[in-house]
Each structure stands twice: as structure tokens, then as C-alpha cells.
């Protein structure tokens, strides 16, 4: 039994896991094409997955953060590229709109995150600013009853599917002593005049998850808010590692060398035991952070710990899975190769491992 998970949350995750079993045949072609099938996104809308973090009063499921983490784990185990898109849409973007937008903005934008017509985007990173987000150059200026934005965003998930993006821009001049001052979140419809989406990036992994630039040239917009998504990345890491290790265990039982299954060899058994122990620890860290968030308690440090440990664990677990399959693990005919590529991004996006260590240390050592 897991102390953070209730029966309803288990049932929700189980239903998503059952649905995701039907995705296997779609994955190779979509990864090759570099895009999520629109009908799969529409299915997620009909299932309610895209609106699960949105309150029932606003038309969503009103599920807990723990439930959302479990669903992301199941989606990541089935198809990491799809899980990334859902995490951004239903975690960062929906969460920002729910917590910080006006009533009118919620009424206008939340339905577009739930109906399956697309996936929302969050635009923070720029060509010259990544971990140092406070150095962003995208500028917003007030004009009449609205705003105009100029700038370029890079590595934006869901850009090609998004009805809108939450864009971080600076209002006013940069203050060298207070670089974060003036940074504001805006809702930017991606069909607005002056907005264009760049070509999709060619990535090592997560190839069906769109990653593109967004260029805003004097684009008119309306203002909104933002939040983080580290718990979601921890849950994705758990799902990726879990499935890679499942595949490796099955292979180890069937593959024979020196007259017996390779699962009989002590070195391999120790590798699996260590990886599974780290996986269990990562899941508990992620669910603890989600549980704290659900109860309105501080969770910044716990989310950073979960993201750091789980993403680093995913690197070790997918590496172990490839090693267990040997030469086959390096071949695209075997899915562990894709999980190893997809998992590599988890230590980078939503704050690198180095940034997580800074967040954790700062919270521990603050006066």
C-alpha cells in the first residue's frame, strides 16, 4: 500500500493505463514523423485526461496532484512523447490559468486545454536565456487596453499544437540589481497577428513531442500567470524507467547464454535489484511532493528533490536496461533504445539537475 494514493486515484491511473495499451502500434510512425497524432490528443480530451487538473466547477475532473502524477507515470511508461505534451498542457499551463487568471480568462482559455483540439504551451526559454531565466529579453509594452510583445522563445513544447502559449516577458527596463523585476506572464494566442512558429527541432529523444521556436513581432496579447512542473517531470521519469526495466526483465528471462537465462547471472540480478529500489524511492518522492501540494503545504524543496532524484534515476535505469539487452539494446527494433533517448531530457527541462541542487541547498541553508 502507498500512503499517498487513494482508491479513486488508483482507478483513474488504471483506466489510463488500459487506454494506453492501444497506443503501441501508433508510436513508431509518429516518432518517425515527429508529431503526435491529432486523434490521440482528441481521445485524451474525451477521456478527461486533459482537464483532470482543472476544477469540476470549470468543467474539469478536479483530480488531485497525486492522481495526475500517477497518470503521467502511466502515459510515460506507454509513450514518453505523449506524456510530455500532457504534462505541459494539464500541469503547467492549466495550473497557471486556474490559479492566476481572471474569471474571464479562465472561461475563455480553459476549455481550449480540455477539448482535445490542441495542447497548451509554456514559453520561457530564449536563445540567450535558459537556466538564467531572469535574463530573458522578450519585452512587453502596454498599448491602449492591451499589450504588445516582441521577442523569440526557444525549445517550446507543443508549439505546433497549441491554441495559445503562456509567455514570460519583461515589462519595463532591465534593472541589473533586480533582474527578475518586471517579468510577467501573458496569454498569447498563437494565431494572433505577429506570432509565428518556427521549424520543429531535431531532437535526440521525445521525437513525437513537438519542440519549436515561437517568434512574436509586435504581437497583441492579454495578461495571465505561471507555475512550475517539477513533480510532473519526476512522474515522467518514473514511468520511463519503469517500462524500460520491465522490458529488460522480460528479456533477461528469455535470453540464454552459456546454457542458461542471463537472469540467472548474479551481476545482472544485482543491477536489476538496484534499479528497482531506486525506482520505488523515486515514486515515493514524487507522490510525497504531490501530496503536499494537494494539501496546500510548502512543496518547493520536495518537488526539486523528486525531480532531481527521479530524473537521475531514469538515466541509470535506462542505461541498465540497454546493458541487459546488450547489442540488441542499442537497436531501434527494441523499445529500450527509445526509452533511453527519451529519458535523457528529464535532467534538463523544467530546470537542470544543477538548478534543482541549488533550489534544495538554498531552502536548507536559508537563514
Image: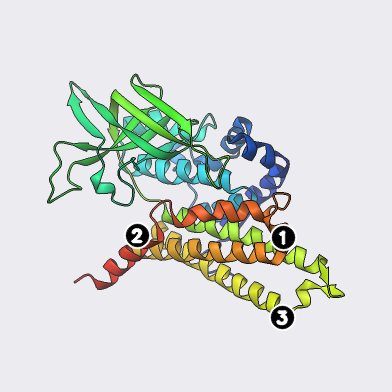
Position of 218 with respect to 90 (left or right) is left
Residue 149 location, quadrant: top left
Residue 22 spot, x, y in % from top left? 72, 43
Location of residue 281 with respect to 185 vertically, above or below: below
* Between 144 and 212, the one nearer to me in the picture: 212
The Cα atoms of the two marked residues, 3 and 1, are separated by 20 Å
Say which quadrant the N terminus sits in: bottom right
Badge 1 marks a residue whose secondary structure is helix
Q: Residue at x 40, y 51 (%)?
A: 350
Badge 3 marks a residue whose secondary structure is helix
Q: Nearer the viewer, mark 2 or mark 1?
A: 1
Location of residue 11 with respect to 257 vertically, above or below: above
Residue 318 location, quadrant: bottom right
The Cα atoms of the two marked residues, 2 and 3, are separated by 37 Å
Q: Which mark is residue 266?
A: 3
Q: First in sequence: mark 3 or mark 1?
A: 3
Is the residue marked by circle 1 packed among few (<14), some (14-19), or many (20+) residues within 10 Å? few
Position of 197 with respect to 80 (left or right) is left
Q: First in sequence: mark 2 or mark 3?
A: 3
Q: Which residue is mark 1?
A: 327
Q: Give the mark count.
A: 3
Instruction: Decide if residue 280 is in sight here.
Output: yes
Q: Which residue is mark 2?
A: 355
Is the residue marked by circle 3 packed among few (<14), some (14-19), or many (20+) residues within 10 Å? few
Q: First in sequence: mark 2 or mark 1?
A: 1
* Between 265 and 157, the one nearer to me in the picture: 265
* Between 346 and 256, the one nearer to me in the picture: 256
Amino acid at each position: 500500500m502507498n500512503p499517498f494514493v487513494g482508491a479513486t486515484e488508483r482507478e483513474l491511473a488504471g483506466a489510463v493505463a488500459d487506454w494506453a495499451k492501444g497506443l503501441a502500434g501508433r508510436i513508431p510512425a509518429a516518432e518517425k514523423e515527429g508529431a503526435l497524432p491529432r486523434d490521440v490528443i482528441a481521445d485524451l480530451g474525451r477521456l478527461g485526461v486533459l482537464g483532470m487538473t482543472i476544477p469540476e466547477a470549470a468543467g474539469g475532473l478536479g483530480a488531485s496532484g497525486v492522481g495526475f502524477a500517477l497518470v503521467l507515470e502511466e502515459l510515460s511508461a506507454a509513450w514518453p512523447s505523449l506524456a510530455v505534451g500532457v504534462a505541459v498542457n494539464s500541469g503547467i499551463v492549466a495550473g497557471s490559468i486556474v490559479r492566476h487568471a481572471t474569471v474571464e480568462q479562465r472561461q475563455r482559455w480553459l476549455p481550449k486545454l480540455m477539448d482535445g483540439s490542441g495542447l497548451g504551451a509554456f514559453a520561457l526559454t530564449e536563445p540567450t536565456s535558459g537556466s538564467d531565466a531572469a535574463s530573458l529579453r522578450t519585452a512587453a509594452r502596454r498599448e491602449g487596453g492591451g499589450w504588445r510583445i516582441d521577442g523569440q522563445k526557444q525549445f517550446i513544447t507543443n508549439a505546433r499544437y497549441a491554441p495559445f502559449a503562456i509567455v514570460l516577458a519583461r515589462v519595463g527596463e532591465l534593472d541589473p540589481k533586480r533582474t527578475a523585476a518586471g517579468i510577467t506572464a501573458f496569454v498569447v494566442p498563437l494565431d494572433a497577428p505577429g506570432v509565428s512558429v518556427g521549424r520543429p527541432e531535431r531532437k535526440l529523444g521525445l521525437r513525437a513531442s513537438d519542440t519549436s521556436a515561437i517568434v512574436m513581432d509586435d504581437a497583441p496579447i492579454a495578461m495571465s500567470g505561471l507555475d512550475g512542473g517539477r513533480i510532473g517531470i519526476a512522474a515522467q521519469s518514473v514511468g520511463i524507467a519503469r517500462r524500460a526495466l520491465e522490458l529488460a526483465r522480460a528479456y533477461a528471462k528469455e535470453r540464454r547464454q552459456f546454457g542458461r537465462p542471463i537472469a540467472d547471472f548474479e551481476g545482472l540480478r544485482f543491477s536489476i535489484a538496484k534499479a528497482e529500489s531506486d525506482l520505488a524511492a523515486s515514486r515515493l518522492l514524487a507522490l510525497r511532493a504531490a501530496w503536499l501540494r494537494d494539501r496546500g503545504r510548502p512543496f518547493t524543496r520536495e518537488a526539486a528533490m523528486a525531480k532531481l532524484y527521479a530524473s537521475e534515476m531514469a538515466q541509470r535505469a535506462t542505461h541498465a536496461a540497454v546493458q541487459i539487452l546488450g547489442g540488441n539494446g542499442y537497436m531501434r527494433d527494441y523499445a529500450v533504445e527509445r526509452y533511453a533517448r527519451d529519458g535523457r531530457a528529464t535532467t534538463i527541462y523544467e530546470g537542470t539537475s544543477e538548478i534543482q541542487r541549488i533550489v534544495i541547498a538554498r531552502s536548507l541553508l536559508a537563514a
